[in-house]
Image: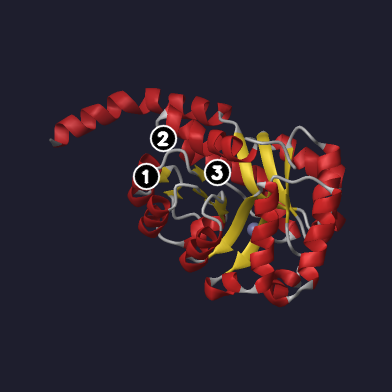
Amino acid sequence: MKRRRIVAGLAAAPWGAAWHATAAEQLPIFDAHVHYSHDAVALVPPKQAVQILRAAGLRGVLVSSSDDEGTQKLLAEAPDLIVPELRPYRTRADTSGWTRDTGIVDYLEARLAKYKYVGIGEFHLYGADAELPVPRRLVALARERGLILHAHSDVDAIDRLFAQWPDARVLWAHSGFEPAQRVREALRRHPRLWCDLAYRNDQADGTLVDAGWRAAFDEFPARFMVGTDTFTPERWHYIGAHAAYSREWIATLPPALAQNLAWRNAEALLRANPPR
Ligand SMILES: [Zn+2]
């Protein structure tokens, strides 16, 4: 056994490494979790921001911002690249209080009347707060327009969103920071649930994909996508490194699965319909 393993290793290594390097280089990435909030606009102006996105070799970028002006500025600068979604936050401070603030409904209605989006989010919503009037109205607004919901939520809130709107398409931010097994259970329950892997690193250690996550990707090859999550302005300077890191581990997967995770799944969900 030992000898066979050594021989196989010697035979596979040079060819395998070369194939991996080429595959990783050529893999387009769709970054499905970028924010360009007021403080990021001040730190990285729109033209420079688009340069960062293009230098990272991104094929598409799902962007939301507090306030929404950042998203609109990026979209104007790179309409081919930016996929806009509407964050229900006027400033970063709304992150915690929005579920009980009726001013958020006015804000959403005003923005939706003025601009077009593929979704509403990313919003933070946990447990029974999903039943409060403001989140319910957010879901109703998305439903009227056929927009996706991008939810940073626990499993309970995800279940409640689907109870309110069974035909919703929900993108689960950070896969809820749940372990792979719990994510699989949620995906089995909800055929219209997709997951981003933003700001987590348990799916791969370097290029070595975790066995539990690999099983999740194999069971649901069409429902995962990657994202940086620029939740602070400084993280804009990490977008290129994140794309490179994603290419490295994704390129170790079988080619069809790799393409799905890198960009096809995001494109299928986020570019299925034009913004509306
Ligand atoms: Zn985020």
Find residue 111 and report its image quarter.
bottom right
Q: Residue at x 56, y 45 (%)?
A: 226
Q: Nearer the viewer, mark 1 or mark 3?
A: 1
* Residue 136 image offset from top left, x and y in percent: 64, 66
Q: Is residue 151 above or below residue 12?
A: below
In the rendered image, the quadrant that contains the N terminus is: top left
**Contact check, label 1 and label 3, Cβ < 8 Å:** no
Residue under circle 3? Answer: 245
- Of the two numbered discs 1 and 3 on the same chain, state the one appearing first in sequence: 1
Residue 58 higher or lower than 129, as above or below: above
Mark 1 packing: few (<14 Cα in 10 Å), some, or many (20+)? some
The residue labelled by disc 1 is 214
Q: Amino acid at mark 3?
A: Tyr
Viewer-side label of 3, 2: 2
Residue placed under numbered mark 2 in the picture: 253
Q: Residue furthest left?
A: 1
- Quick one: which residue is furthest to the front in this view? 144
Give the CA distance from mark 2 to mark 1.
9 Å
Residue 82: x percent and y percent? 74, 40
Looking at numbered disc 1 in the image, what kind of residue is underneath it? Arg
The secondary structure type at the circle numbered 2 is loop
Give the residue type that dot 2 points to: Leu
Helix, strand or loop at disc 1? Answer: helix
Quadrant containing the C terminus is: top right
Between 211 and 5, which is closer to the camera in this rendering? 211
Q: Position of residue 220 (x, y in %)?
A: 40, 42
Quote the CA–CA distance across marks 3 and 2.
Answer: 14 Å
Label 3 residue SS: helix
